[in-house]
Image: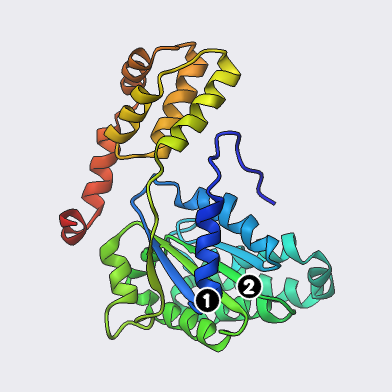
Amino acid sequence: MNTPSKWHFPRSELAQAYLKQLEAGLNSIAIFAERRKGKTEFLLDDLTPAAKDKGLRTVYINFWERKSDPVYCITQGVRRSLETDSPRQLLQWKNEFSVKLGVFQSKTTVDAHQYPEIAGEALDMLVASKGGVLLMFDEIQHLATDSSYEELIATLRTFLDTNKGKVRAVFTGSSQDRLNKIFRRQKAAFYRGASLVEFPDMGAEFISFLLVNFQDITKRKLTKKHCLTIFEEYNNSPFLIVDLLQTMMREGIYNLDEGLTYYLTLNNPDDEWRELWESLKLVDQLV
């Protein structure tokens, strides 16, 4: 199981809220938030343990693990889940699984676009045993970048529709336009396949949590109001504020103004936002 970092701010209530929505009848939800907002960390360190506590098998699939090969991303997510959650079942399937996985990997190195059925076969392994399954598809919007992925999207939709009784899914994306292409375009295979839900920014409680950590480690106290102002100024990015505080600790800097000045000499957040901005389509920039 993934062990959360000391700097991870638990969002257990949000995880429980999402799970309750899925338990109440929603088969799939889609979470939109910009990059560096903590979506991946939330899936791994909050939603995954909460789902496991409810007896669900969890499967994390990140389509940026290998952008050119989404089928590989799916098969690797399935493999990790089986190794972690079902070692006995994996042992029982050893021969069949090894053969199939070998085929998956050899085929996906040739041309992932041509083998969406491989993804279907991998996912079918998850429902061969009793119990519910929570599938987490991170950066799902990547499948909207190439029309050749449409058959794979249809395969995912078919799998979820066929296994509604035991499978729930959470999708995340950092492009509103591409998420809409997948879930809102009438001719899309995933049309109305997920309900879009809010992923709220963290706030003052998050900053308090970080400053307690900082003080525990350095025995130095920082001003919460000033730290919160910096956090809000830089787009409420948990990545940036944690990176800033960790940089200050490494360099022995215990003043936020000095720390931010030094941090900005090493990292230019504007470049990161500019890179993100330029990667977005016009409709995302206008939101």
For the question of whether residue 172 can be seen, the reply is yes
Q: Position of residue 281 (x, y in %)?
A: 20, 59
Marks 2 and 1, Cα distance to the nearest angstrom?
15 Å
Residue at 67 percent across and 70 percent down: it is: 102
The quadrant of the picture occupied by the C terminus is bottom left
Please state which amino acid type lies under the numbered disc 2.
Val
Mark 2, residue position: 133
For the question of whether residue 115 can be seen, the reply is no
Q: Quadrant of residue 36?
A: top left
State whether residue 98 is above or below residue 10: below
Q: Position of residue 16 (x, y in %)?
A: 55, 60
Residue at 47 percent across and 30 percent down: it is: 208
Mark 1, residue position: 24
Q: Is residue 128 left or right of residue 6?
A: right
Please state which amino acid type lies under the numbered disc 1.
Ala
Q: Is residue 284 left or right of residue 68?
A: left
| Pointer 2 local density, CA inside 10 Å: few below 14, some 14–19, many at least 20 | many
Q: How many marks?
A: 2
State whether residue 210 is above or below residue 81: above
2 or 1: tag closer to the N-terminus: 1
Residue at 48 percent across and 13 percent down: it is: 251
Mark 2 element type: strand
Residue at 56 percent across and 26 percent down: it is: 213
Name the colouring of the figure. Answer: rainbow
Q: Position of residue 160 (x, y in %)?
A: 52, 81
Q: Nearer the viewer, residue 134 or 223?
A: 223
Q: Position of residue 66 (x, y in %)?
A: 48, 58
Q: Which of labels 2 and 1 is toward the front? A: 1
- Residue at the limit of the structure toward the bottom, as seen here: 162
Q: Is residue 2 left or right of residue 223?
A: right
Q: Nearer the viewer, residue 71 or 178?
A: 178
Q: Nearer the viewer, residue 25 or 107?
A: 25
